[in-house]
Image (tube, helix red, strand yellow):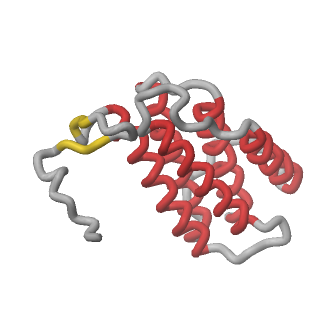
Amino acid sequence: MSITTKRGDEGMTSLIGGQRVLKCDDRVEAYGTVDELSAFIGILHDTIQDTEDNTKAFLMDIQKNLLTVEAIFASPEEGKIPHLDPSAIVAVADRIAALENELPPFRSFIMPGGNLAASYAHVCRTICRRAERRAVKIVAKGVELQYLNRLSDYFFILARKLSV
């Protein structure tokens, strides 16, 4: 089976359930931005060395969760796709708390950069913030919106950790 269907040649795509929309539809923008985030997380994953806290494995867990977020954003029918488990938010919050305990208190703005891994973490943070804005635009709420909000904080603190 070929990946090329030619069904998108006129600027349309299908949401989950078959509804055809323009490729610039707010839902497509939302799940497309989450997909972009996942791709950059892959680069970040491949850039860092694994640590005692298994950051690489955690990044892969994030990518799996983002697949669920993408599916929810691609589904115009509420309840068609099971929501992300709230424990995903707790896992990210726990990671943030653990990293905060390792680092000195945050006292000023931080310029993105420092090294390649930290820079990629900052790129993930900014794409995650955009994904959150896109999610708000499609009136996403609840677990998925909270997850994206927490996740951008995680990438900020991870960037700090990676630049030490």
Q: Residue furthest right?
A: 101
Q: Position of residue 90 (x, y in %)?
A: 79, 40
Please report the residue visible at 43 percent of the width from the left and 54 percent of the height from the top.
36
What is the quadrant of residue 79 in the picture?
Answer: top right
Which quadrant holds the C terminus? bottom right
Q: Is residue 105 visible?
A: no
The answer to whether 41 is drawn above or below residue 48 in the figure is above
Number of labelled discs?
0
Compare residues 5 and 128 and report the one nearer the observer: 5
Please report the residue visible at 53 percent of the width from the left and 51 percent of the height from the top.
67
Q: Position of residue 63 (x, y in %)?
A: 59, 57
The answer to whether 51 is drawn above or below residue 132 in the figure is below
Q: Is residue 121 visible?
A: yes
Please report the residue visible at 58 percent of the width from the left and 75 percent of the height from the top.
46
Please report the residue visible at 50 percent of the width from the left and 26 percent of the height from the top.
78
Which quadrant holds the N terminus? bottom left
- 10 left or right, relative to 136: left
Q: Residue furthest left?
A: 10
